């Protein structure tokens, strides 16, 4: 009887399971695929502007073609599999911000809502706008940068040493020096480095020969902060409020003065430009170069009056060949600004360059090199700005 009872219970369970299964068979939701709905036309890419390449993470790129959706959100644009932000759209044009991916032959593909097919693949180059260049130690602090005619970079590090970064990024020891840190350093004729330094009571320009040997080139009563070269091989030096010309035979003479201590100078287009003043009151003056003397200084730009520089200290500057002024600061988020000849300004590669840009030096081409000081460490930044710097006489 017990066996019969178990059999009846099992049979009842099987019957109930079958009824439940049958009752559920027709409860699936209807298919989302509509076999009668036609796919939209395949998107087509005919042109990308700028052609060939742009900067990863910063450039705005225009894609021209056909069969795009006028609603930006309905277009998906991929560079090497990474999605770009679509800024605006029409049926024949998409404007996107380049994603932060680097590659020489990235596949560009576009998907449009309602279209079954991606666009045919085209290839595009996204290059790095900003690179950390060379290899520094975790506690290395960079104070000065110089670049030679072959685009090798030389960096003065706190701790009495100079390193060299070759064109492939390889970093090697270059020289041991007697000074703790340089206020500035530039490449001069005969591949000799010149550094403005203070060593105890000695205020001098040091010369570091290609074999790494250091010697005193000339001394000053005031601290020398910066130097530049003219086409005759003379060194122009800012020491306190004064400007000196130092000839190759090491003779020197004072040729002009400014109303504030000068921290940076540049010889550009027949003028000497000088940065000076306290934080919040800084200015760049200029004085015409008249042979080996200076004309009367005039105010070039009142940096302290620029609201876009409010709260920032200007630490360095450099001119592009087209006259744009690149300004390095200690600004927390965006540390390099560009002042155009018409008075307008912009941030260089917004969101990519933080504090603090202690030195700016142009190479031979489109790269500007920056000494970036962080909290207890540093980077050398190699920045592709897409234009050449003003001519530099020291490595001619």
Image (cartoon, rainbow, N blue to C red):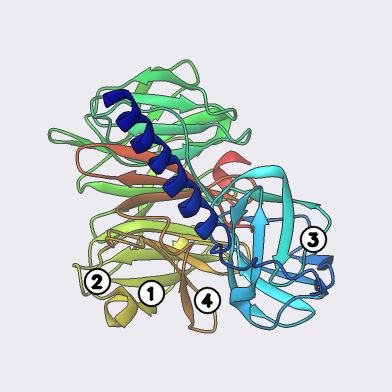
Task: Work out whether residue 44 or residue 371 is closer to the camera in this orientation and state it.
Answer: 44
In the rendered image, the vertical position of residue 112 relative to residue 237, given as above or below: below
In the rendered image, the vertical position of residue 15 relative to residue 149, given as above or below: below
Foreground disc of the pair 4, 3: 3
Q: Are marks 1 and 3 in contact (CB under 8 Å)?
A: no
Q: CA distance from mark 4 to mark 2?
A: 25 Å
- The numbered mark, 4 or 3, whose residue comes first in the sequence reads 3
> Disc 1 designates what residue?
297
Classify the position of the N terminus by image quarter: top left
Q: Residue furthest front?
A: 1
Element under disc 1: loop
* Side (left or right) of 167 relative to 375: right
> Disc 4 designates what residue?
340
Q: Are marks 4 and 2 in contact (CB under 8 Å)?
A: no
Q: Residue at x 56, y 66 (%)?
A: 29
Q: CA distance from mark 4 to mark 1?
A: 21 Å
> Disc 2 designates what residue?
259
> Label for residue 121?
none
Q: Position of residue 69 (x, y in %)?
A: 71, 79
Residue 166 lies in quadrant: top right
Q: Are marks 2 and 1 in contact (CB under 8 Å)?
A: yes
* Side (left or right) of 380 relative to 77: left
Residue 189 lies in quadrant: top right
> Disc 3 designates what residue?
117
Q: CA distance from mark 1 to mark 3?
A: 66 Å
Q: CA distance from mark 2 to mark 1?
A: 9 Å
User: Is residue 340 something one can see in this rendering?
Assistant: yes
Element under disc 3: loop
Q: How many C-alpha atoms fall within 10 Å of the one at disc 3: few (<14), some, or many (≥20)?
A: some
- The numbered mark, 4 or 1, whose residue comes first in the sequence reads 1
């Amino acid at each position: 009887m017990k066996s019969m009872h178990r059999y009846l219970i099992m049979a009842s369970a099987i019957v109930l399971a079958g009824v439940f299964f049958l009752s559920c068979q027709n409860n699936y939701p209807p298919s989302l695929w509509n076999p009668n709905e036609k796919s939209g036309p395949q998107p087509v890419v005919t042109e990308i502007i700028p052609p060939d390449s742009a900067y990863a993470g910063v450039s705005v790129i225009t894609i021209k073609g056909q069969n795009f959706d006028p609603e930006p959100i309905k277009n998906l644009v991929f560079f090497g599999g990474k999605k770009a932000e679509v800024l605006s759209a029409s049926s024949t044009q998409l404007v996107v911000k380049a994603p932060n991916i680097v590659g020489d032959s990235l596949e560009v593909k576009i998907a449009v809502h309602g279209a079954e097919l991606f666009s045919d693949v085209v290839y595009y180059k996204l290059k790095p706008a900003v690179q950390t260049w060379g290899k520094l130690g975790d506690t290395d602090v960079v104070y000065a940068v110089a670049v030679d005619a072959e685009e090798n970079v030389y960096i003065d590090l706190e701790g009495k040493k100079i390193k060299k970064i070759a064109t492939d990024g390889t970093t090697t020891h270059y020289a041991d020096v007697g000074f703790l840190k340089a206020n500035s350093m530039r490449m001069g004729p005969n591949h000799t480095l010149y550094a403005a330094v203070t060593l105890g009571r000695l205020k001098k320009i040091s010369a570091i020969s290609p074999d790494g040997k250091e010697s005193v080139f000339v001394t000053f009563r005031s601290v020398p902060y910066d130097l530049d070269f003219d086409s005759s091989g003379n060194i122009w030096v800012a020491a306190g409020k004064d400007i000196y010309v130092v000839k190759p035979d090491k003779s020197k003479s004072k040729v002009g003065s400014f109303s504030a201590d000068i921290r940076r100078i540049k010889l550009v287009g027949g003028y000497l430009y000088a940065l000076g003043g306290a934080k919040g009151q800084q200015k760049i003056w200029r004085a015409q170069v008249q042979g080996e003397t200076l004309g009367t200084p005039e105010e070039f730009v009142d940096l302290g009056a620029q609201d876009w520089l409010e709260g920032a200290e200007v630490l360095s500057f450099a001119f592009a060949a087209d006259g744009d002024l690149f300004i390095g600061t200690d600004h927390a988020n965006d540390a390099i600004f560009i002042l155009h000849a018409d008075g307008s300004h912009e941030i260089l590669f917004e969101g990519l360059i933080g504090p603090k840009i202690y030195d700016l030096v142009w190479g031979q081409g489109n790269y500007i090199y920056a000494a970036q000081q962080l909290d207890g460490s540093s980077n050398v930044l190699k920045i592709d700005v897409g234009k050449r710097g003003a001519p530099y006489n020291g490595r001619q």
